[in-house]
Amino acid sequence: MAPLNQVILITGASTGIGLATARYFAQRGWQVVATMRTPHKAPADLHTLANVLVLPLDVLDVASIEAAVAAALHAFGRLDVLFNNAGYALAGAFEALSPAQVQQQFNTNVYGVMNVTRAVLPHFRGRKQGLILTTTSVGGHIAFPLYSVYNATKFAVEGFMEGLQYEVKQFNIQVRTIVPGTVRTDFTAAIQYVPAPDYDPYAQRVHEQTLASYAHAATPESVARVVFAATTRGGTSARVLAGAQPKLVYLLRWLLPRRVLSGLLNRTNGG
Ligand SMILES: NC(=O)c1ccc[n+]([C@@H]2O[C@H](COP(=O)([O-])OP(=O)(O)OC[C@H]3O[C@@H](n4cnc5c(N)ncnc54)[C@H](OP(=O)(O)O)[C@@H]3O)[C@@H](O)[C@H]2O)c1
C-alpha cells in the first residue's frame, strides 16, 4: 500500500473509468483529487470520503484547470500522479461531421490533455518527481470506420505522450498511456453519432455493430486496477494495455501485415 500522503489528480472522474479509478485509489489510502465538470452530479460517496477532494475542472477551460491544481496543492501540498482521463467520441462518416464538431473533439481529447499536463508539469519538475498517465484507446493504435476523427485524437495523444516522455525524463517524470479496449461506461451513451444517409446502410450497420460489441466490454473497475498497478508497480513500459482485448489487438497490429489486418477489420465491419 502507498504511503497515505500520495496524491492523484483525475480528470473526468464523474463516471466510468475516472470514477472507478477515484474509488479504487481512495480505498487504498491515496488522497484523490476527483475533478469533473459538474461536481454536484458526482456520486454521493465521492463527497463523503475523507480522502477525496471533488473539484470542478473542464479540460477546455484553462482557468478551471489552474484553479483545481492550485486547490489540490493547497489541500494536500503535492501531486504525485496526474491521470488525464476525460474524453468522449465523435462518430460518423467524416463527410457528415462539421468542422465545429471535429474541432470540439480535438479540443477535448487532445488540447484538453495538453492543457492539464501543462498546468501540472511545473509542479512535477520542481519536485523532480511525477507520473503522467493518460487514457488513450486501442483506437489510438488501430483506426475503425466511423471513428476516424476520434481515432485521430487518440493517435495524436499517443504521439504527444511518446515525445513528451523523453523531454521530462531528466526531471524524473514518467509518462505512460493507459490503453483500454471496450469498457462498459457512459462512453457509448455519450457518443456523439452523426448520421450520414449517403453512407447507409453501411454506416448504420457499422454503428450498430460497434454498440453491440460492448456486450463483451471490460468493467471500469478492471481498468482502475490496471491504472493502480501502472502507478504502484513501477515498470518502464510507455503503454499499458488494459486487459486481454487491447493486448490481442495490439499483438495483431504488430504481427499481421497491414493489408491482412485491414481486410480482417473490413470483413468484421461488414464492408
Ligand atoms: N469506454 C470505452 O469503451 C473506452 C475505450 C477506450 C478509451 N476510452 C477512453 O476512456 C476515457 C474515459 O471514458 P469512459 O469510458 O470512462 O466514459 P464516460 O463514462 O463517458 O466518462 C468520460 C468522462 O469524461 C468527462 N468529460 C468529457 N468532456 C469533458 C471536459 N470537457 N472536461 C472535463 N471532463 C470531461 C465526462 O464528464 P461529464 O460527466 O461532465 O460528461 C466523464 O466524466 C475517455 O478518454 C475515453 O476516450 C473509453
Image (cartoon, rainbow, N blue to C red):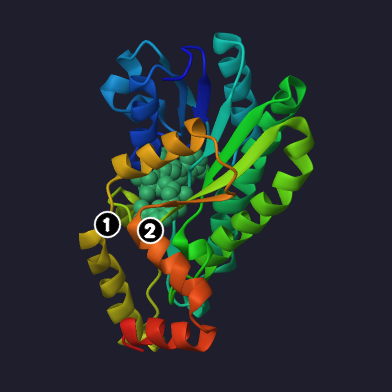
Q: Is residue 163 left or right of residue 30?
A: right
Whole-percent x, y for residue 269 in the image: 33, 82
Does label 1 or label 2 sit earlier along the sequence? 2
Q: CA distance from mark 1 to mark 2?
A: 8 Å
Disc 1 marks a residue whose amino acid type is Ala
The residue at 52%/84% (across/down) is 257
* Image marks 1 and 2: residues in contact by CB distance under 8 Å: yes
Disc 2 marks a residue whose amino acid type is Gly
Whole-percent x, y for residue 115 in the image: 66, 40
Q: Residues within 10 Å of mark 2 (few under 14, many from 20)?
A: many
Nearer to us in this view, 4 or 53: 4
- Does mark 1's beta carbon lie closer than 8 Å to ligand 1? yes
Label 2 secondary element: loop
The residue at 66%/44% (across/down) is 114
Q: Is residue 92 above or below residue 232?
A: below
Is residue 12 among the parts visible in the rendering?
no
Q: Which quarter of the picture shows residue 70?
A: top right
Q: Which residue is mark 2?
A: 181
Quadrant in which the C terminus appears: bottom left
Q: Which residue is mark 1?
A: 217
